[in-house]
Image: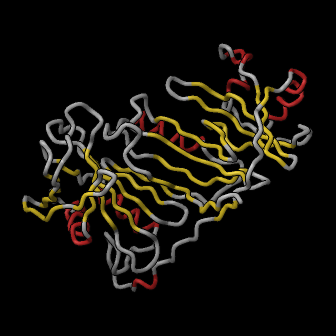
Amino acid sequence: MKNNEIAALSLLAALVSPAMAQDSGVSFSHKNWELACDNTNTCRAAGYANEDEPSASNGSVLLTRIAGPGTVPTGEVTLADYEEGDSAAVAKLTLWINGKAAGALKPTKYGNWNLSASQTLALIGAIKGSGTVEFKGGPAPFVLSGEGASATLLKMDDVQGRIGTSGALTKKGDKPESSVPAAIPAPVIQAVKVPKAVERPLTAPEIAALTPKLLATLQPDDCDRMQSPQDNDGASEDGIMLTPLGNGHALITAVCWRAAYNEGYGYWVIDSALKQAPVLVTNSGSGYDEGIISMGQKGRGLGDCWATASWVWDGTAFRQSNEATTGLCRLIHAGGTWDLPTYVAEVKAAQ
């Protein structure tokens, strides 16, 4: 992944922040490995092949560990299918460590492969040092890089409070597993059913009265099509839309920015009479439907890496329910490789 691609995903992650502060998770990357720990302290570490080995098959390994004492990491493998010439359907995939077979993996109904508990630990032991890890079964082996693995696993242990414990993946010690902090409960959002209503464009007088209030919620360069319409072709014709949310609330939607392969919409909550101060939800939304604002932005034009987020209406505000990326831009799958959340919530369906 090139530096500008890392910067693009980092920027997208920053853009999805909601108006109200949330306890967010942790993101970390080093060389061919990355880490995403969500707000419950569940951590997911993804590793990739070296990009300078074109003769090998492409793929990725995901190591997941739930927070709290006594949990163990689980492992999963996916093989690339993005480019012509990538591995075709593989009937059997076998783990090899330091040139020795370490058993076949179990296929899943989603097309990935699960490692057993012993295979996962053996893989972790190899990538922490100078061992070699390969997955054989396709036209060429998928060789997992160990570059960046030790730093990433150390960060996982740090986030989960495991350093110095017997269950640490890196710096083990004598501290008991009982000293590991418990998982943090995910916040609960009670979704509220919104009325079936058609959005309408604001009138010219409404736009004139509301625009200064919308601009007051923005930081510089948050929404250049509203903040600097003179510098954006067609911005004056974008329009601002209103969708009723029920119980005296409404949702305001406006185009905020357009780029080469992404665009972002601003979403604000306001009273139906448009008298009160609007509350910004996001300036990078992608769509709204039945009480849910969603965001999906490409990390690059090839579409092999994305940043995503969502917000759910609870009757008074849109509460963030998810924030994630799909991993590094490595041409593994169209639409991204993994689901790597840094924020999750339990959403109770509207009654």
Report x, y in % for residue 262: 53, 29
Q: Which residue appears farthest toward the left when viewing the image?
A: 99
In the displayed structure, does residue 296 sit left or right of residue 275?
left
Residue 42 in view of the camera = yes
Q: Up-down: is 229 above or below 18?
A: above
Q: Which residue is rendered at x = 37% and y = 77% of the image? A: 164
Report x, y in % for residue 293: 65, 43
Q: Which residue is rendered at x = 76% and y = 32% of the image? A: 199
Report x, y in % for residue 292: 65, 46
Residue 134 in view of the camera = no
Q: Up-down: is 341 above or below 219?
A: below
Q: Which residue is rendered at x = 70% and y = 61% of the image? A: 190
- Residue 1's quadrant in the figure? top left
Please give the count of numbered marks on the rendered protein: 0
Look at the image and tell me in which quarter the C terminus lies.
bottom right
In the displayed structure, does residue 141 sit left or right of residue 339?
left
